[in-house]
C-alpha cells in the first residue's frame, strides 16, 4: 500500500507543493526573507572577482544554447537505445518544466514585491538556469542504462548543483529561487516517469513496477532537514545586514542545503527506477 501511495506521480506532486511552500516562506515571512538574504550575501561574497570568469562559464552550461544541445543529445540517445517512449517524454518534460518556470517568473513578481535586505534586486522566481540544469540532469538519468546510472547521477548532481551555486554567487538569483527551480524540474521529471510506467504497464505480460522512492530517501532526507533546521535557527539569530563572509558561517551551512536537495532529488530518481528494463519501443 505504501509503495502505491509513493509512486513517482505522488512524489512529483509533493515536490510541486514544496516549491510553493518555499515561495510562501521566502516571500511572505520575515524569517524566510532573512534566511534567503543571509545565504545570498554569504554565497555572493564567496564568488570573488578572481573566480568570476569561471563561475560565468558554469552558468553558460545551462544557457539556451547548451540546453537545446544537451536536450537534443538526450533525445537522440533515447532513440539510439530504442527507448521511443522516453524519446517523446524527455523533450516534453524539458519544455514543460522550463516553460512553467518562465511563466512563474512573469506571474510571481507581479503578485509580490519583496526586496532583498540591503540590495536592489529584481525577483525572478524560480531560477530558469536551475530548472534547466536539474531537468537536464534528471532526464539524463532517465535515458541512461542501468549500468551507467550511478555515473549519470554523480555527473548530473555535480552539474545541477554547480549551476545553482554559480547563479547565486554571481548575484543573479536568491537561494529560494534556485531551490524552487530544482523542485519544479523534479516535479515534471517524476510526472514523466509516471507516464512512462503507465504506458509500459499496458503491454501484454508486463508485471508492473513497484516504486520505492520515498522509503529509500527517508534517512538522507531527514538528516538533511535536521541540518537545515539547525542552520536556519542560527541564521535567523544573526544580523542579516553584515557583509563579511566570516560572520556568515551559519548562512553558508544553510546554503549547503542547495547541494543537499540537488543530490537528494537525483539520488531519489535513480533509486526509483527499476534495475532492469525492456528495450523494445519503450
Image (cartoon, rainbow, N blue to C red):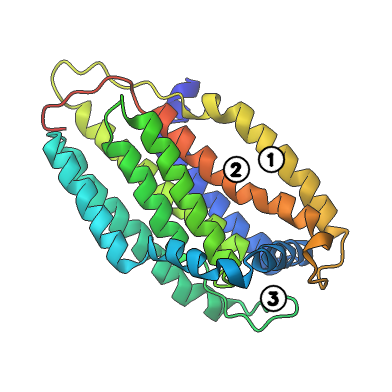
Q: CA distance from mark 3 to mark 1?
A: 24 Å
Q: Residue at x 46, y 51 (%)?
A: 160
> How far across and how far down the image is residue 53, in percent?
49, 70
Q: Residue at x 58, y 47 (%)?
A: 259
Q: Residue at x 46, y 69 (%)?
A: 104
> How far across and how far down the image is residue 221, in percent?
62, 35
Total tally of numbered discs in the picture: 3
The mark that comes first in sequence, 3 or 2, is 3
| Element type where label 3 sits in the image | loop
Residue 114 vs 197, above or below: the answer is below
Q: CA distance from mark 1 to mark 2?
A: 9 Å
Q: Is residue 10 visible?
A: no
Of tags 1 and 2, the one toward the viewer is: 2
Q: Which of these two is toward me, 52 or 89?
A: 52
Residue under pointer 3? 116
Q: CA distance from mark 3 to mark 2?
A: 24 Å
Residue 28 vs 149, above or below: the answer is below
Residue under pointer 1? 225
Q: Are marks 3 and 2 in contact (CB under 8 Å)?
A: no
Amino acid at each position: 500500500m505504501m509503495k502505491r501511495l509513493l509512486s513517482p506521480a505522488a512524489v512529483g506532486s509533493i515536490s510541486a507543493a514544496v516549491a510553493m511552500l518555499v515561495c510562501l516562506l521566502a516571500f511572505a515571512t520575515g524569517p524566510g526573507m532573512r534566511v534567503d538574504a543571509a545565504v545570498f550575501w554569504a554565497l555572493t561574497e564567496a564568488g570573488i572577482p578572481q573566480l568570476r570568469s569561471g563561475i560565468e562559464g558554469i552558468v553558460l552550461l545551462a544557457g539556451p544554447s547548451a540546453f537545446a544541445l544537451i536536450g537534443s543529445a538526450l533525445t537522440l540517445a533515447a532513440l539510439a537505445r530504442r527507448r521511443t517512449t522516453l524519446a517523446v517524454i524527455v523533450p516534453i518534460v524539458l519544455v514543460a518544466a522550463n516553460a512553467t518556470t518562465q511563466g512563474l517568473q512573469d506571474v510571481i513578481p507581479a503578485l509580490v514585491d519583496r526586496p532583498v535586505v540591503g540590495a536592489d534586486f529584481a525577483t525572478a522566481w524560480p531560477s530558469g538556469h536551475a530548472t534547466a540544469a536539474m531537468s537536464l540532469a534528471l532526464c539524463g538519468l532517465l535515458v541512461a542504462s542501468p549500468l551507467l546510472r550511478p555515473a549519470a547521477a554523480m555527473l548530473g548532481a555535480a552539474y545541477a548543483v554547480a549551476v545553482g551555486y554559480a547563479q547565486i554567487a554571481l548575484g543573479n538569483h536568491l537561494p529560494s529561487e534556485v531551490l524552487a527551480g530544482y523542485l519544479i524540474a523534479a516535479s515534471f521529471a517524476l510526472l514523466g516517469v509516471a507516464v512512462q510506467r503507465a504506458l509500459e504497464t499496458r503491454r501484454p505480460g508486463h508485471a508492473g513496477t513497484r516504486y520505492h522512492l520515498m522509503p529509500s530517501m527517508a534517512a538522507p532526507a531527514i538528516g538533511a532537514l535536521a541540518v537545515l533546521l539547525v542552520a536556519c535557527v542560527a541564521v535567523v539569530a544573526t544580523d542579516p545586514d553584515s557583509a563579511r563572509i566570516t560572520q556568515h558561517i551559519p548562512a553558508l551551512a544553510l546554503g549547503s542545503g542547495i547541494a543537499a536537495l540537488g543530490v537528494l532529488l537525483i539520488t531519489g530518481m535513480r533509486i526509483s527506477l527499476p534495475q532492469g528494463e525492456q528495450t523494445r519501443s519503450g
